[in-house]
Amino acid sequence: MLKVENLNSFYGASQVLRDFSIDLAAGEVLCLLGRNGAGKTTALRSIMGLLRPRSGLVTLDGRELTSLPGHEVPKAGIGYVPQGRRLFSELTVAENLEIGLMCRGGGEEVRERVLQYFPRLSERLDQASGTLSGGEQQMLAMARALCVEPSVILLDEPTEGLQPSMISTIRDVLLQLRGDGVGILLVEQRVDAVRPVADRVAFVENGCVRETVGVAALTENPELLRKYVGVG
Amino acid sequence: MDFGPFLFLATLEGLVQAAVLCLTALGLSLVFGVMRVVNVAHGEFYMLGAVIAWWVTSIVGIHPAVGFAAALAIAPLAVGAIAFAGERLILKRLDYNPEATIVATIGMLYVIQQMALLFFGPDPRPVEAPFYFRIQFPWFGYSGYKLIVVAAAIAILLIAWFVIAKTRIGLVMRATQFDGDTAQAFGIPVNRVYASVFAVGAMFAAVAAVLIVPIRQAHYLMGLDPLLLSFIVVILGGLGSIRGTIVAAILIGLSDGIISVFFSPTLAKMASTLLVALVLVFRPQGLFGREEL
Ligand SMILES: Nc1ncnc2c1ncn2[C@@H]1O[C@H](COP(=O)(O)OP(=O)(O)OP(=O)(O)O)[C@@H](O)[C@H]1O
Ligand SMILES: [Mg+2]
């Protein structure tokens, strides 16, 4: 459903993405793995229309996104969980969710459904989101993205700085979403967080996808991890 | 007059000053807060508001109140439209770069000022107040219109507060202010928000000018003082803090009014400038600003 072909993105004069291509099917979890600075965040920002690629094509169910104005991209049905969460920290939990809901005109029933994933947020609707704990902030970042009712969701290191129980909460939500047919593009550093959820893994190096493998290959072929991530 | 009544009179004058300053500075503060643009042309939007008010009242000559009502509707809209065009044509193309927009708005200041000189002329022109009545206090009579100005400013500020704090439009503005990129990633048309905020900011200045022009007269150089005072207020209140802006505007407006009545307007400006210098030394983030600013 989400097709990314030969993106070339620049920050000023320096090229970060080089013919970056991936394919994501409905109900699939594709994980991007790569070293710091490989260009994973830049890839997600380019798909979201936050950074305009100099060339290349992004389509969602055949609809071209690259030519849309930036704010129209999420309205096509893409939810975004940015690296570092990027909550509107002075706004309340409810207001953060409202921003997500406004994107595609979701109403009360969407909000209720999203909050069922994260019951702890329901108790804190009027709290300023900046005062939430790290784990709660990550839940809110995901909840906000789900309020868009996305058919594809992009997550940039959602487990960064979280304890194991929180990581498993997030994993459960991702598995449910996958079951509902949502396409999931997941950027991760931690290989242990990838194995239980991913269907396929794309290794990013120097702004380019070098290799895409089934998740089983991580276990069968630890050489891959050593080569692209430097662990294993 | 005894000291008590005299102080009361000075306070009333200060309140009028504070009311107008609240509106003007709020416009500057909104634009800076949401767009991070320092709008040096802000005072010229104020001047345009007054000049257009003169022009409208001189055309609609049935009754001063009718002309004034027309001016109150038309002048802010016209100024808003001009600001909107300036934003689209200039600031957007500079990608809201902080340094470039300062230079650009300085340019806008001179263009608007010279256009006013060209079409409006160098002489101050009076605008008739919509009505005359005096409120008789035991010690002196006071212009009813001035008190209406204060009431109108309070009403406008309350509406502005309600829109910003309680409506979806306000939520979109606040989200854009905190993090434009993320706002856009959730479908907020950040560009359009910027253009609207710039226009609304200019409209606040224009409304303030229309309210004050029956007291002060329209003149093509009248934008300088409000620009300076608004800057002082915005810095004093803390950059981007709306609550700080209002508190500082009341503080500066009152002290400016009172010192002007008791001593001289020049001393009042000196006192304000000294106050802002002290704040910058001892509390650089302003009275209500956050530490990191
Ligand atoms: N705003 C920016 N301006 C200039 N260069 C940038 C900017 N953002 C990222 N870069 C550069 O682009 C390259 C890719 O960065 P990116 O954030 O996409 O990496 P990443 O794979 O997400 O890394 P990490 O795992 O550390 O999050 C880096 O070399 C970085 O320095
Ligand atoms: Mg990153």
Image (cartoon, coloured by chain):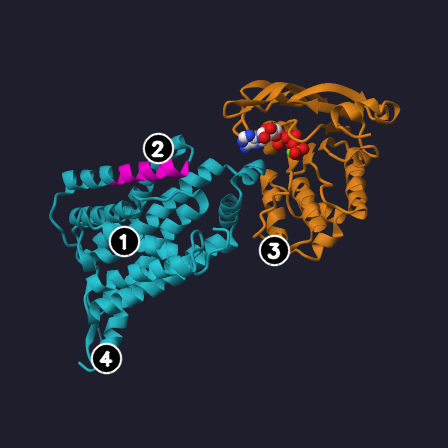
Give the residues in magenta: B97-109
Distance from Cα at disc 1 to Cα at disc 3: 35 Å
What residue is shown with label 1? B226
> The disc numbered 1 marks a residue on which chain?
B
Magenta residue check for B226: no
Query: Residue B90 has which mark?
Result: 2
Tell me the shade of chain A: orange
- Please rate how many residues cluster around mark 3, counting C-alpha atoms within 10 Å: few if below 14, some from 14 to 19, many from 20: some
* Front residue (pair A206, A27): A206
Amino acid beneath label 2: Ile
* Residue bearing mark 3: A128
Q: Locate residue A14, reporting x and y percent.
A: 54, 23
- Specify few, some or many for label 1: CA neighbours under 10 Å numbering under 14, 14-19, or 20 or more: many
The amino acid at mark 3 is Ala
- Residue A17 x, y percent position in the rendering: 61, 22
Is the residue marked 3 within 8 Å of ligand 2, measured from its CB? no
Ligand 2 position by quadrant? top right
Residue highlighted by disc 4: B5
Are the two marked residues, 1 and 3, in contact with CB atoms closer than 8 angstroms? no
Sooner in the amino-acid sequence: mark 1 or mark 2: 2
Q: What residue is at 49 percent from the left and 38 percent from the top?
A: B190
- As helix, strand or loop, the secondary structure at mark 1 comes to helix
Q: Chain B's colour?
A: cyan
Q: Is residue A8 left or right of residue B265?
A: right
Chain at numbered mark 3: A
Spatial CA span between label 1 and label 2: 23 Å
Chain at tag 2: B
- The Cα–Cα distance between marks 2 and 3, rounded to whole angstroms, is 36 Å
Q: Mostly what secondary structure, the magenta segment?
A: helix
Amino acid on which disc 1 is placed: Pro
* Category of crowding for the residue at label 2, using alpha-carbon neighbours closer than 10 angstroms: few (below 14), some (14–19), many (at least 20): some
Check if mark 3's residue and mark 4's residue have beta carbons within 8 Å: no
